[in-house]
Amino acid sequence: MKKIIIIAMLAFFGFANAQAFKGKGDVKFQVGATFQEHATGIGTTADFGVGENISYGFAVSYLLNTTNAIGTPKFDDRFDAKARFNANIGNVLNISDKFDLYPGLDLGIRNFGAHIGARYFFTSGFGIYTEAGIPLAKFNPDAIGYERFNNQFVFQFGASFNL
């Protein structure tokens, strides 16, 4: 019985075509946890391949837990939405078909920023990702308190899906 299970697992993983970025027509959806100074939350992204190594997409995040002692943040202090552009260079680095590294730029309702992310696919439809982002230009450079929440370094990790 042990041999049958091992053979079945090898066959499953051997036939699974887990490709991280396929190029034009590729669609990725990611959902994960976000971590930043004085707040944690949830973030989602959707990326659409338009070329061999280029994709565009959208990102939305919402802060669930805040630890700043100054009052209670409003909805617009917790919410952020961005349009994004990625250079998917996993195949350029030639590490693995299952791995993608994607630096990019994003334009949000609060800032213009940059991000770098990596994703690894275990199967053709499921993988994990991690991403870090930082603002390059803030729409309100004098923001204080909760207004700063979406204008700082953000780290994310979670699940990635091929659609």
Image (spheres, rainbow, N blue to C red):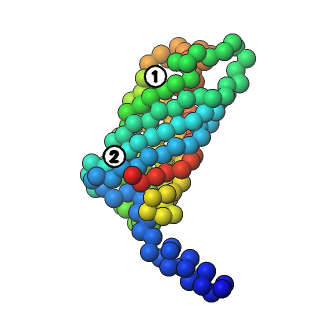
Disc 1 marks which amino acid? Arg
Where residue 66 sits, quadrant-wise, is top right
Q: Is residue 47 left or right of residue 3?
A: left
Nearest to the observer: residue 91 or residue 81: 81
The quadrant where residue 109 appears: top left
Most foreground residue, 44 or 112: 44
Q: Nearer the viewer, residue 18 or 112?
A: 18
Residue 29 visible, this angle: yes
Q: Identify the amino acid type marked 2.
A: Phe
Decide if residue 66 is on the left or right side of residue 53: right
At a point 51% along the width and 57% down the height, the residue shown is 127
Q: Position of residue 121 (x, y in %)?
A: 48, 60
Q: Which residue is mark 2?
A: 48
Q: Nearer the N terminus, badge 1 or badge 2?
A: 2
Q: Residue 154's spot in the image, x, y percent?
A: 56, 35
Image position, residue 15 (x, y; %): 44, 75
Q: Quadrant of the N terminus?
A: bottom right
- The label on residue 110 is 1
Q: Residue at x 50, y 79 (%)?
A: 11
* In the rendered image, the vertical position of residue 97 relative to residue 57, given as above or below: below
- Residue extending farthest right: 69
> Residue, x 44% and y 19% (percent of image)?
139
